[in-house]
Image (cartoon, grey):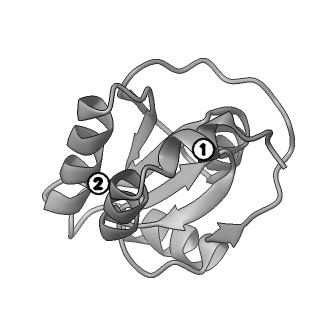
Amino acid sequence: MHRLQFNNRSAHGRFGQIANRNDNAVETHCVASQDVVVVGMRQNPFPRRARKLLEQQAIPYRYLEYGSYVSQWRERLKLKLWTGWPTFPMIFVKGVLIGGFADLQRVVEARELGKLLAAPRS
């Protein structure tokens, strides 16, 4: 897990909502204020799998989508540099990058997601 520092501001989100953004301000805002954030891209099956897994667990999340393989690559590159994570999805729980879909799956199977969500935000 990778710990990132953010400002504490509130955001409006609901189950699976897609946000539009122009820079990292929205990402910082969402990750800092939402319990679970999934950052993904169209055509990549792993963000969809992560969202489906969260929905099966009845975990509300915020979804941020960044184009497809040929569009919005600059924005995705900024995110990769910002987080140090090379692939999508990027899954954040309480402001902490837990990794991608396989990492989320391991956390869910180990029954650790509830513990992470119950813990205070650091």
> Around disc 2, counting alpha carbons within 10 Å, would you say few (fewer than 14), some (14 to 19), or many (20 or more)?
some
* Relative depth, front residue between 27 and 49: 49
- In this figure, which residue is indicated by the disc labeled 1? 115
Q: Quadrant of residue 69?
A: bottom left
Q: Is residue 26 above or below residue 99?
A: above
The residues tagged by marks 2 and 1 sit, at their Cα atoms, a distance apart of 32 Å
Tell me the crowding category of disc 1: few under 14, some 14 to 19, or many 20 or more residues within 10 angstroms, Cα based: few
Q: Is residue 97 left or right of residue 10?
A: left
Residue 112 picture location, percent across and down? 51, 52
Residue at 25% over, 43% down? 53
Q: Give above or below for 100 relative to 87.
A: above
Q: Which residue is mark 2?
A: 67
Q: In the picture shown, does residue 93 fall above or below 46? A: above
The amino acid marked with disc number 2 is: Gly
Q: Answer whether residue 24 is visible to the viewer in this image.
A: yes
Quarter residue 55 falls in: top left
Residue 98 image offset from top left, x and y in percent: 54, 64
Q: What amino acid is found at the position of numbered circle 1 in the picture?
A: Lys
User: In this view of the protein, which residue sits in the foreground, 76 or 6?
Assistant: 6
Q: Name the residue nearer the viewer: 20 or 117.
A: 117
Camera sees residue 44:
no
Q: Is residue 92 left or right of residue 58?
A: right
**Mark number displayed over residue 53:** none
- The earlier-in-sequence mark between 2 and 1 is 2
Judge by depth and name the residue closer to the eye, 23 or 109. 109
